[in-house]
């Protein structure tokens, strides 16, 4: 039977020489978008999830242990940070700058591990673009590879999370790499492809648990590969597929344990953390929109890709599947990862935009393959006109690129927490009593020895400021209404009482219109649909100052 798919290029050359420059531009764009502004919160490091990995890596090198003692997220990304720190120690030791690990730790700049973590994430996002190029060109030539890499390089949430030292983007990189081996398998790949693919899927799960979705296209590739080879009887092919599936499961388990050995060595802690994690998925968490998860998922994909590129996905998938042959099977492999992942998260109450990050590389591939397939149809001659085609591609990437660039611009400006902290440091006298909602990282950082800091959750009596219980009350939009034992209505009553008592009010807002505490919390929790309303990162912060304390206009940064 004739294969109607696009021409299949060789795996060996990375690209024709004519396309090295374009590939270099795309990879440079991807890296710069992820690095620009990624030190915006130094030295405070406001992203709460980063501390799960960075703080534990530092603690592990201090204690000389490999046990992260934390399993709500798997530890492979933490190990990557730890390995980098050990590499730096080894270099300094050989050069005579650090005579011992204790000396290295004592002289380690406290901010350096966060810089390492964020660079690792940015490099992983850029590496994903390279893997997509290699996969994309296999069924559509260099143009398809370049388009897939370009679409992913500007995708908004992929860029945003590439700024932070968290495990999401590295997991996506490993999932994409496992898909590369799935494609090789369905083309009749060798045993090394099976081995490395299975191990890579396990490593993806050891980076973030939902990375285990990488096994699905590998399983499907085994079936498609056997049907492609033909020859043997149905029973023989089924037996070979079963053997490959078992091998993949064992290899994935080996990869997972290689990246998460204490899942066995500290099994009780691991099981307890996993039980807690599954329970978490069954309930909405503080800050999550009350909209249906289906709507949240759609909003996420719209912001990630933009409407033009997202609407192209079903059309491109239909074109690729209709062509048949290898291209249709490769598209089916991509959909075998995207659709189960989306359906799984639609079945859960708990949702965050980054849960859908593994879908983006494969949606980018489908769009790239579909565009090249349409471009090769004889009657679509306009699509081969360079200027017209360039304008169409610019339209497709305009929305996510504009959001990504605007995010980078925002991250160049001082965070509201830094501005609020500068104000407090400027007017609060040593020993001043400052009331905050919680110990959250969302509140302004304060010197613990200079001030007496109290928290509403520890002292609900602070809700009644008769006689001026404190010098300052600090509220922020990420914590308001989230204080255990204190309702949002009680916090509102407290603010009204403070204003009636003559407390001056200072507002540090991330919004252009200066919105106060009850703005949408989307800068940390939601889908960034209203990104262009913001002028800086951070929560809205309101500070009430006791009568007599000078109040100044906040710096614009």
Image (cartoon, rainbow, N blue to C red):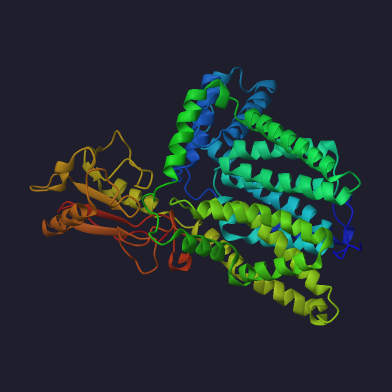
> Where's residue 301, x and y in %?
56, 62
> Where's residue 134, x and y in %?
79, 53
- Would residue 286 appear left or right of 227 to someone viewing this image? left
Q: Nearer the viewer, residue 176 or 474?
A: 176
Residue 69 sits above or below residue 287 on the image: above
> Where's residue 449, x and y in %?
29, 33
Residue 400 sits above or below residue 130 on the image: below
Total numbered labels: 0
Q: What residue do we see at 53% from left, 60% from top? A: 407
- Would residue 88 appear left or right of 443 to someone viewing this image? right
Q: Nearer the viewer, residue 447 or 59?
A: 59
Residue 510 sits above or below residue 176 on the image: below
Q: What residue do we see at 75% from left, 40% from top? A: 197
- Would residue 226 appear left or right of 71 to someone viewing this image? right
> Where's residue 451, x and y in %?
26, 38
Farthest top residue? 100
- Would residue 312 appear left or right of 191 to someone viewing this image? left
Q: In this orientation, does residue 66 appear?
A: no
Q: Nearer the viewer, residue 540 or 209?
A: 209
Q: What residue do we see at 8% from left, 48% from top? A: 466
Q: What residue do we see at 76% from left, 79% from top? A: 388
Q: In this orientation, does residue 341 appear?
A: yes
The C terminus lies in quadrant: bottom left
Residue 211 sits above or below residue 7 on the image: above
The N terminus lies in quadrant: bottom right
């Amino acid at each position: 039977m004739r294969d109607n798919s696009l021409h299949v290029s060789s795996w060996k050359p990375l690209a024709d020489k004519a396309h090295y420059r374009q590939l270099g531009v795309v990879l440079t764009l991807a890296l710069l978008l992820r690095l620009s502004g990624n030190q915006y919160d130094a030295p405070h490091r406001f992203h709460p999830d980063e501390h799960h990995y960075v703080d534990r890596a530092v603690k592990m090198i201090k204690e000389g242990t490999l046990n992260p003692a934390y399993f709500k997220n798997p530890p492979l990304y933490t190990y990557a940070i730890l390995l980098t720190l050990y590499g730096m120690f080894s270099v300094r030791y050989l050069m005579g700058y650090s005579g011992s690990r204790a000396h290295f730790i004592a002289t380690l700049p406290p901010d350096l591990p966060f810089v390492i973590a964020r660079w690792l994430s940015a490099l992983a996002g850029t590496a994903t673009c390279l893997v997509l190029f290699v996969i994309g060109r296999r069924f559509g030539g260099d143009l398809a590879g370049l388009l897939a890499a370009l679409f992913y390089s500007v995708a908004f949430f992929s860029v945003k999370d590439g700024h932070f030292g968290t495990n999401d983007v590295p997991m996506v990189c490993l999932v994409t790499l496992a898909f590369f081996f799935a494609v090789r398998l369905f083309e009749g790949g060798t045993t090394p492809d099976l081995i490395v693919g299975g191990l890579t899927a396990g490593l993806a799960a050891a980076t973030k648990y939902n990375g285990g979705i990488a096994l699905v296209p590998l399983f499907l590739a085994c079936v498609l590969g056997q049907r492609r080879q033909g020859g043997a009887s149905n029973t023989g092919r089924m037996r070979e597929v079963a053997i490959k599936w078992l091998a993949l499961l064992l290899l994935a388990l080996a990869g997972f344990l290689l990246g998460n050995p204490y899942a066995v060595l500290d099994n009780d802690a691991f099981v307890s953390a996993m039980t807690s994690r599954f329970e978490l998925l069954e309930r909405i968490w503080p800050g999550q929109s009350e909209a249906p998860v289906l709507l949240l998922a759609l909003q996420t994909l719209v912001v990630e890709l933009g409407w033009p590129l997202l609407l192209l996905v079903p059309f491109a998938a239909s074109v690729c599947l209709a062509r048949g042959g290898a291209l249709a099977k490769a598209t089916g492999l991509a959909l075998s990862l995207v659709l189960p992942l989306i359906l799984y998260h639609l079945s859960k109450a708990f949702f965050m935009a980054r849960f859908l990050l593994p879908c983006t590389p494969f949606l980018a591939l489908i769009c790239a393959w579909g565009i090249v397939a349409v471009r090769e149809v004889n009657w679509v001659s306009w699509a081969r006109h360079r200027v017209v085609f360039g304008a169409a591609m610019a339209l497709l990437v305009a929305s996510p690129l504009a959001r990504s660039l605007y995010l980078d611009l925002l991250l160049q400006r001082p965070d509201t927490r830094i501005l609020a902290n500068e104000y407090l440091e400027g007017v609060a006298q040593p020993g001043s009593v400052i009331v905050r909602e919680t110990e959250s990282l969302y509140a302004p950082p304060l010197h613990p020895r200079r001030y007496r800091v109290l928290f509403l959750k520890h002292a609900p009596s602070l809700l009644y400021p008769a006689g001026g219980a404190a010098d300052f009350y600090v509220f922020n939009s990420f914590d308001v209404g989230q204080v255990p034992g204190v309702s949002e209505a009680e916090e509102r009553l407290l603010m009204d009482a403070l204003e009636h008592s003559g407390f001056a009010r200072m507002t540090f807002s991330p919004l252009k219109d200066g919105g106060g505490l009850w703005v949408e919390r989307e800068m940390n929790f939601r889908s960034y649909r209203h990104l262009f309303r913001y002028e800086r990162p951070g929560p809205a912060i309101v500070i009430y100052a006791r009568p007599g304390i000078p109040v100044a206009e906040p710096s614009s940064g």
